[in-house]
Amino acid sequence: MTNWFAGSRWCNGDLAPTPAEERKWPAFVYAAFWTAHAADATAWTAGSATVALGLTWWQAWLALNTAHIIGTFLIVANGRMASRYHVGFPVCARVSWGMWGSYMAVAMSRFDEIVQIIWNGVNTYYAGLLVSVALQCIWPSWANVPNTLPESAGITTRDLIGFQCLTFLHPRDLKWFYVAKSIIVMTAMNGILIWWLHKNGGVHFSAQPPTQIPRVWLWLEAFNSGFGSVSSLTVNQADIARYARSPNDQLWGQIFIFPLASALPGLYGTLVASASQELYGTPLWNLWDVTQTMLDQYPHHSGARFGIFLAAASMALALIAVNLATNCLPFGSDVSALFPRYMNIQRGQFICCLLGLAIAPWKILQNGDTFLAFLSGYGYWLAPIAAILCVDYFYVQRGNVVTAELYNGKPGGLYWYQKGWNIRAPVITVLSLIPCLPGFASTISTQVKISVNAARLSNVSFILTYVIAALIFGPKQPR
């Protein structure tokens, strides 16, 4: 750490540029990271939940993966600055928002801060339910643990015991973890898919299910939820890209792999949901119901129960890995920026885990519609921040950043702007959010009454908000 970092309120060990000896992530590790990130229960659930909307399996799959392809380019673009200058998102934000303004960017991305806590809790709860299935494979009596909680709690004693939050490891230590996880989880997903297709007698291309909503709007809702599952890394990619050996490592390790890797879990989720709908009349859109139904078929078959144990435990591992990369890590990075003297990444990760339990995440996973509404709203809020970071770096800054000035919090500094604020960034963020705000509010509360057309804007909220922010921010601005 050079002298101009020492003692500064703008820096600590996690905010400083990543030392050369810690830039260890080559392209194949990024490829494994994205395979591991894509091959998780959230991607599976997003695919299966879209079937529950009333789409056919191929319509749901196409909507999600169109969003993922576009999202991949946005993610890689916002990883460029970090992979070149080796700094995380809170420091990258200083370029486009100003030194003090970056705190607003961090706080805004932390609706995202709040949502990171929610997502961490949702994924941890989801993992806990899979752990519960895995424990039933070993000890069938686990299914009979008495519930001592009231019905109003929305969760049973057994499921609460399975809730675990051990997700506070430093990202620089995780590269081999993601390589191993990508292999284990894809194997488990293939096993689950094969079982259901065998049970259902193959894949059946059924007719479109009846629906009262025009199908194009259902497709756009699924499309928007696809952005929700990748939107966090359109903003926080810097927290991962900073460990790249070179900018090309994060580029080529991601640009092709993520669209391919994400295509499979979503497809598997839609196929299994379609198969379960044919078999039982109801699409099983979450993996704990999928694996629990599989387990119920084998009350006394030890070999089958062992296989289901491996599948459920592997998917729980997948959710823990996603929490590490996209929830605990960004939260830890941001609180480290807000309170550099008292916080570091690992302390922030631990706080995120504890708060994730406090927000009762099981309420979000009650049904497919609630889950998709959560995904869609999440992406909408992050879109203008991602757009401003991208346009500012490539169009305004022309890809040139002065690293020392990222830690210069004095008037006259390159990224000081006006009293530490580039006022255009927050103003444009607010303006770009306005068109879809009524629709977003209606997804949060049923008490908000809006027109049908206003509600439908929420079905394209991410891409519309991103484009508005990018177009307004684009014209070159004076210093």
Image (spheres, grey):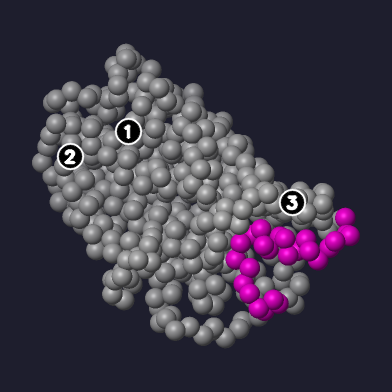
Q: Nearer the viewer, residue 42 or 445?
A: 445
Q: Quadrant of the C terminus?
A: top left
- Location of mark 3 (residue): 146
| Residue 275 visible in the shown view | no
Q: Secondary structure at mark 2?
A: loop
**Amino acid under disc 3:** Pro
Mark drawn on residue 91: 1
Farthest-out residue, left: 478
Cα distance between the residues tagged 3 and 2: 57 Å
Q: Is residue 117 magenta?
A: no
Q: Earlier in the sequence, mark 1 or mark 2?
A: 1
Contact, mark 3 vs mark 2 (Cβ under 8 Å): no
What is the C-alpha distance between the residues marked 1 and 2?
14 Å
As shown in the figure, which amino acid type bears the numbered disc 1? Val
- The quadrant holding residue 307 is bottom right
Image position, residue 303 (x, y; %): 86, 56
**Residue holding disc 2:** 422
* Label 3 vs 2, first from the N-terminus: 3
Query: Helix, strand, or loop for circle 1?
Result: helix
- How many tags in the picture? 3
Query: The magenta stretch spans which residues?
Result: 278-302
Q: Nearer the viewer, mark 3 or mark 1?
A: 3
Q: Nearer the viewer, residue 268 or 225?
A: 225
Residue 475, compared with residue 419, is above or below; it is below
Q: Is residue 320 left or right of residue 64?
A: right
Q: Residue at x 47, y 56 (%)?
A: 229
The quadrant holding residue 44 is bottom right
Amino acid tagged 2: Asn
Rendering coords of residue 435 (x, y %)? 24, 63
